[in-house]
């Protein structure tokens, strides 16, 4: 299978669609999910991967037609061609460009690639957008997730401090999004992670972000009302199961 790194891409004319998942797909996007049968197929249920959700929201915002391909994440080692197309990373999501057959992996590279290739709907590259929330998900939330006893409160304080940074930024700028009046790459990267913290944190640790973080709550309400949100989001039950599993795995590694 042909594989090309994102640093050596050439431009191909883009195609636009009112509904990215309804038009003739330009990409297959391989995401965490529950295939109907086997290890990988297009029939199944969307799983709980915030990085896949980030990528799909980017494609939705840019009206890039794609087809979802569901992968059983816990059996990825059984997929014989996976190492080749992800350069050994075994990292979800990854995409295949239908026209060329080329493969691209890692949302940190896929997102700026899409910004270059489909510039009509500008979202900005991650390094061009506000640099906020870099430690919110990992390490702050991950560390809080496995904290117990005396170490729980300082880890919770660390998580709340990270949320306070987001709340302060939005309050000082007075804009609805981190991108200003419209979303940017930062909004699309952070919002799925914050949703996972809200759902997984409550299910596993009883965590709820206090109402005093009004700017974060208002921003999340706006994000969840966007047309790009629904097609990219799994049922919350997947997040609940996923974060219970993640806590078990993190505790086993401690």
Image: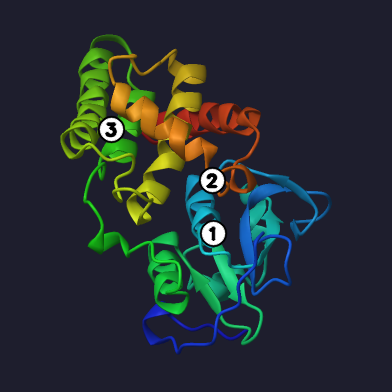
**How dense is the environment of label 1, judged by Cα within 10 Å: few (below 14), some, or many (20 and up)?**
many
Q: In the visual, does 3 lie left or right of 80?
A: left
The quadrant of the rendering that contains the C terminus is top left
Residue placed under numbered mark 3 in the picture: 140
Task: Give the color scheme: rainbow, by chain, secondary structure or one colour.
Answer: rainbow
Q: Which of marks 1 and 3 is nearer the N terminus?
A: 1
Find residue 8 and report its image quarter. bottom left
**Residue 8 drawn above or below residue 131:** below
| Badge 1 vs badge 2, beta-carbon distance below 8 Å | yes
Q: Taking the image as drawn, is residue 63 in sight?
A: yes
Q: Residue furthest right?
A: 37
At a point 58% along the width and 41% down the height, the residue shown is: 48
Residue placed under numbered mark 1 in the picture: 93
- The alpha-carbon separation of the residues under discs 1 and 3 comes to 23 Å
Q: Position of residue 45 (x, y in %)?
A: 73, 44
Find residue 193 and report its image quarter. top left
Residue placed under numbered mark 2 in the picture: 49
Secondary structure of the residue carrying numbered label 1: loop
Secondary structure of the residue carrying numbered label 2: loop
**Residue 214 drawn above or below residue 104:** above
Secondary structure of the residue carrying numbered label 3: helix
The quadrant of the rendering that contains the N terminus is bottom right
Q: Where is residue 253 in the image (x, y as percent from the top left)?
A: 39, 36
At a point 25% along the width and 41% down the height, the residue shown is: 135
- The alpha-carbon separation of the residues under discs 3 and 2 comes to 18 Å
Q: Which residue lies furthest to the left in this view?
A: 172
């Amino acid at each position: 299978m042909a594989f090309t790194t994102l640093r050596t891409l050439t431009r191909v004319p883009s195609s636009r669609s009112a509904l990215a998942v309804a038009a003739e797909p330009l990409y297959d996007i391989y995401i965490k999910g529950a295939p109907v049968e086997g290890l990988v197929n297009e029939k199944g249920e969307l799983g709980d991967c915030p990085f896949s959700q980030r990528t799909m929201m980017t494609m939705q915002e840019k009206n890039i037609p794609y087809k979802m391909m569901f992968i059983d994440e816990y059996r990825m080692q059984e997929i014989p061609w996976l190492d080749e197309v992800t350069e050994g990373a075994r990292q979800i999501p990854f995409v295949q460009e239908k026209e060329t057959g080329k493969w691209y992996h890692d949302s940190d590279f896929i997102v700026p690639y899409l910004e270059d290739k489909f510039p009509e709907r500008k979202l900005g590259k991650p390094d061009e957008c506000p640099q906020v929330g870099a430690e919110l998900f990992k390490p702050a939330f991950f560390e809080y997730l496995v904290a117990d006893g005396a170490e729980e409160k300082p880890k919770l304080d660390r998580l709340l401090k990270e949320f306070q940074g987001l709340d302060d930024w939005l309050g000082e700028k007075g804009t609805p999004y981190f991108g200003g009046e419209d979303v940017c790459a930062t909004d699309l990267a952070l919002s799925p992670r914050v949703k996972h913290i809200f759902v997984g944190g409550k299910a596993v640790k009883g965590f709820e972000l206090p109402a005093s973080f009004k700017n974060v709550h208002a921003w999340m309400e706006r994000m969840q009302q966007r047309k790009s949100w629904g097609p990219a989001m799994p049922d919350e039950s997947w997040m609940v199961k996923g974060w219970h599993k993640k806590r078990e795995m993190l505790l086993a590694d401690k």
